[in-house]
Amino acid sequence: MSYSDILLKYKDLPFEKIFHELSPQEVERSIASGTQEPERLLALLSPTAEGFLESMAQKAHALTLQHFGRTIQLYTPMYLSNFCENECAYCGFNARNKMPRRTLTLEEVEKEAAFIASTGIEHLLILTGDSRTKSSPAYIKECLSVLKKYFSSISAEIYALSEEEYADLVRSGIDGLTLYQETYDEAVYERVHRSGPKKDFIFRLDAPERAARSGMRNVNVGVLLGLSDWRKEVFLMGLHAQYLQDHFGDVETGASLPRLRPHAGDFKEMTEVSNANIAQIIVALRLFLPRLGIALSTRESAGLREDLLPLGITRMSAGSTTRVGGHTIASPEEENAPQFEIADPRDVDAMKAMLVAKGYQPVLKDWMQI
Amino acid sequence: MILTLNGKQESIDKPLSLDALVAAKGLCPDKIVVEHNFSIISKEDWHKITLKDQDMIEIVSFVGGG
Amino acid sequence: MEDLLHIGGRSIKSRLLIGTGKFSSYPLMRKALEAAQSDIVTVALRRVDAGAKTDNILEYIPKSCILMANTSGARNADEAVRIARLAKASGAGNWIKIEVVQDNKYLLPDNLETLKAVEILAQEGFIVLPYMSPDLSMAKRMADAGAAAVMPLGSPIGSNRGMKTRELVEILVREIKVPVIVDAGLGSPSDACECMEMGCAAVLVNTAIAIVRDPVAMARAFREAVSAGRTAYLAGLASSGSEASASSPLTGFLRNETR
C-alpha cells in the first residue's frame, strides 16, 4: 500500500469539526502520551494546543536532545539549472517568468564545488528546475562524477523520477532525496501547478517511497507553508513521514518546513503562517515522530532560526544562495533571478560560530560512502 | 514385508489395505489422520491403498496442547 | 461499538486464547474452557498409540470455539508444514499455530524456520499465527508473509515467569500492524493484565491454568484479568513519567512577535 492510498483515508477528515471539539484535556493527554496514532498529531497541531506551546516545547527539546544530542548538521545548496517546464504559481523559476536561464557546465560545477568544499561543507544539496531536457538524469550523473570528489554526501532536490532512475542516481553517488509535495490538497495542487510535468499529483506523492526503495539513505518530505491550511497540510505530511519511517526502517526520514517567501512569481493568495505557528509545527512533529530529521532553511531569518533551533531542528543550511552558480559565478542580480529570496545570508563560519555559542556541535560530515 | 508405522518397524505377512490396517490396530477412523509415504490419504481412499514393503505410515490424532 | 479482535477474517469476542495441554482430565479441561469463555482453543497433533484407549479431545471442546492446531514437535519448517497439512486434513479447520523448536532446554522458537513455514502455509490459505521470539525484523517479515497475528513469548514455555520480554513486545505492539498475542510464560492473571494494558491484542495461556489446584477458578480469573487490562488500555492509561519541568522558557521569543 502506497502513501497515496493512506492519504485517501485521511484527506477528507472533518478537520474544522475535530479541532472545534478538541478539549484541552485531550491535548494534555496527547502531549504526555508517546503513541503514534494520527489523532494525536491532529491534537498537537490544533488551535487548542496553542495554549500548551511552552510545555510542548520543553518536551520536544528533551526528545531532540535524547535522539540527536546537541548537534546540528550543516549543508549547502547548489543550483545546477533553472530551466523549468512547470508553471508553479509560487516559484521564481516558473516557466512563464521572463528571465535568463542557464545550466552549469561541468567546469562551472567544479568551480562551485571547490568553493563550497573550501568552506568545510561535506553535505551538499543539488537542485535543478524541472526539465528533463535541460537538466536530464544523464546530466545530473555527469555532475555527480565531479561532485563526488568534493563531498562525502550529496542529496538531490529535483523533479520526481522513477524508481529505476533513483537507483541509477544512487549508484552514481546520490544518497538522499528531498522532494516537497508542496501541498497534500489535490485541488490546491491542481490550481497552483498550472502546467508542466509536475501536474501529476500521485506520481510526485509516491516519489519519496520510490526513492526509499531505490536505496537512498535519506528521504525528506515537505509542504510549502502558505499554500493552504497549514494544520491540515502538516498533519498529512506528518503521516507521510510516519509512513516512510514505518515502511523503510533503513532510511532516515526528514521533513522540511519551507514558508512561502517573496519570489518572482504572481501567487497572491498566500495563507498566513505565523512564527508561533512554525514553532507549533516543529514541536508537534517532534512529539509525534521523535527521530524525524527536521530541516530549517535560510527562508527564515537569522534570529528566528536561532530561536527555533532548540525546539527540534536537526539540520540547517549555511552559505546559501538560490541562484544558479550563485557561489562563484558573478552575474548582475537582475540577470539571474533566485528561486526565492533568502533571509539568512550567513556563511558557514558564521553559522558554526553561532551553533558553538549556543552549545551545539556543528556537524559537517556525519557519514561517507565507502 | 516390513512397514514403518509411526516411526516403528512392523512386519506383516500378507498384503493389507490401509483401512484394514486401521481396523487391525483398533483405531476409530473418525479421530485419526493417516499419512502414507508423506501423502495425506483421505478416509474414503484408504481402501484403495495396498501397502507395500518399506512403506511409511503415520497415524496421528489430536491431543491437548498449548 | 463492541471491541472485537479481528484475525483471519473473523471477529472474535474473547482476547484470552487457551491451550489444552497438561490438564488432569478432559472433563476438567472442558469446565475450564467454559469458565474462560475463550473463542480460540489450541490443540496438538500426536502419533496415535495403537494400544492405548483414549477419548477424543475434540469432544470436550465447545463447538463454538475456533480450533487452532499447533505444530509442536516440529524442528524445522518442513515438519511444521507437514503437521499443519495433517491437522487440516483431520478436519480441524485452517487455523494453525506455528511452533518450531530446536532447543529442548529452553523451548525457545526458531524464528527463521518459523518464518519459512509462515510463507508456505499462508500461501496455502492457512490462517497462520506464528509463535516467536519478539524480534522486530522477524515479526515484520512474518506479517509481510501473511501471518494473521504474531505471538511473541513472554518468557519460556511453561516457566510462569511473566513478561520478561516486555520492552521487546512493546516495540512489536507499536510497530506491527497485525495483532500481537503474547504466548507462553504468563504465570498469573496479573501477567495477562499487564500484556493487555500494554496494548497486546490478546494472550494465550495454558500451563498457568491447567496445572493449578482449581483450573476452573483460575480460568475465570484470567478471563477477568484480560478483560480489565483491555478496558484499561482502551481507557488510555495515565502517564506515570515525570513531566519535563521548565528550565528556561523555549517559546518566550514569540511574546514579542510582531507579525
Image: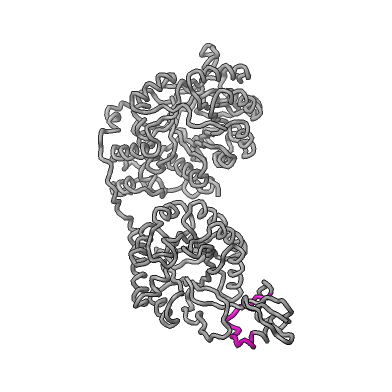
Residue at horizontal 57%, vertical 69%?
Answer: C94
| C87 relative to A40 in the view: left or right | right
Rendered-image quadrant of the N terminus of chain C: bottom left
- Say whether residue A265 is visible: no
Give the x, y percent position of residue A149.
58, 23
Answer above or below: position of C193 versus B43: above
Give the x, y percent position of residue C40.
47, 71
- Say whether residue A150 is visible: yes
Q: Is residue B30 magenta?
A: yes
Answer above or below: position of A129 versus C86: above
Q: Residue A303 lies in what quarter of the image? A: top left
| A185 relative to B37 in the view: left or right | left
Q: Nearer the viewer, residue B49 or C220?
A: B49
Give the x, y percent position of residue B34.
63, 78
Q: Residue A291 lies in what quarter of the image? A: top left
Give the x, y percent position of residue C186.
39, 65
Residue at horizontal 38%, vertical 23%?
Answer: A301
Residue at horizontal 42%, vertical 76%?
Answer: C33
Q: How many marks?
A: 0
Q: Which residues are magenta?
A: B22-36
Rendered-image quadrant of the C terminus of chain C: top left
| A339 relative to A304 in the view: left or right | right
Answer above or below: position of A362 versus A239: above
Q: Nearer the viewer, residue C14 or A189?
A: C14
Q: What kind of colouring is applied to the model shown?
A: one colour
Q: Is residue A17 magenta?
A: no
Q: Residue C17 lies in what quarter of the image? A: bottom left
